[in-house]
């Protein structure tokens, strides 16, 4: 049914992370939240504390169908500074696996890694400078091959549903959206 890892770092945008986890679990997708910090408790940008399912240092994420990065600041910067995560993202993209990022993360993490070259993508407005090689569009969520990007907190549901659609198909994603009164 797909294996998804959502990476959490201090300063993550809570709406983006938790909406994605919730929507994908409603769609029947196996989602594991992974802390890239020193402990399992991660503090969001608005002081919401989340206990991750796993620690990056102790967990093998190489079986991923999708790797997901919420945005938020300094959450995106903290993700970008996690070198093992950046290596995992590059390997995932190289093998054609799914990579999804929203808000600041497309610009702060994916762009500098070269993962957006030749792709249509979106990020938080005003952060386009980091979208190296991307064609920046203005939509809530954009799917271009194995890359899904989202604009920001108000786009969290569209972003999560785009990932769900890529994993379980349009019919199930639509059912989830209807159950959440989004469609």
Image (tube, grey):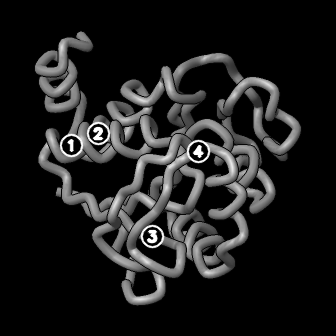
The answer to whether the residues at label 2 and label 1 have Cβ atoms under 8 Å apart is yes
Residue 173, image quadrant: top left
Q: Is residue 30 left or right of residue 127?
A: left
**Residue with the mark numbered 4:** 71
The answer to whether the residues at label 4 and label 2 have Cβ atoms under 8 Å apart is no
Mark number displayed over residue 164? 2
Check the image and name the residue furthest to the right: 129
Residue 123 position, x and y percent, is 67, 33
- Which of the marked residues, 3 or 4, is nearer the chain's N terminus? 3
Label 4 and label 1: CA atoms lie apart by 24 Å
Q: Is residue 110 left or right of residue 31?
A: right
Mark number displayed over residue 168? 1
Label 3 and label 4: CA atoms lie apart by 14 Å
**Residue with the mark numbered 3:** 35
Between tags 3 and 1, which lies in front? 3
- Mark 3 burial class by Cα count in 10 Å: few <14, some 14-19, many 20+: many
Residue sitting nearer the eye, 115 or 15: 15
Label 2 and label 1: CA atoms lie apart by 6 Å
Between tags 2 and 1, which lies in front? 2
Label 3 and label 1: CA atoms lie apart by 25 Å
Residue 153 position, x and y percent, is 51, 28
- Which of the marked residues, 3 or 1, is nearer the chain's N terminus? 3
Label 3 and label 2: CA atoms lie apart by 22 Å
Residue 83 position, x and y percent, is 68, 78
- Which of the marked residues, 4 or 1, is nearer the chain's N terminus? 4
Between tags 3 and 2, which lies in front? 3
Check the image and name the residue furthest to the bottom: 58
**In the rendered view of the protein, which quadrant contains the C terminus?**
top left
> What element does badge 2 sit on?
helix
Q: How many marks do you count on the picture?
A: 4
């Amino acid at each position: 049914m797909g294996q998804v890892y959502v990476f959490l770092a201090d300063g993550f945008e809570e709406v983006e992370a938790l909406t994605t986890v919730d929507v994908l679990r409603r769609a029947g997708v196996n989602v594991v939240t992974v802390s890239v910090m020193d402990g399992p408790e991660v503090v969001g940008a608005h002081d919401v504390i989340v206990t991750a399912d796993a620690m990056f240092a102790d967990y093998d994420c190489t079986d991923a169908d999708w790797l997901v990065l919420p945005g938020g600041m300094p959450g995106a910067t903290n993700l970008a500074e996690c070198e093992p995560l950046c290596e995992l993202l590059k390997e995932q993209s190289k093998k054609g696996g799914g990579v999804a990022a929203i808000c600041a993360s497309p610009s702060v993490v994916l762009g500098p890694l070269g993962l957006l070259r030749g792709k249509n993508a979106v990020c938080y407005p005003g952060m386009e400078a980091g979208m190296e090689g991307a064609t920046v569009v203005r939509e809530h969520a954009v799917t271009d091959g194995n890359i899904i990007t989202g604009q920001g907190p108000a786009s969290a549901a569209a972003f999560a549903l785009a990932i769900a659609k890529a994993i379980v198909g349009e019919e199930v994603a639509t059912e989830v959206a209807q159950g959440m009164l989004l469609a």
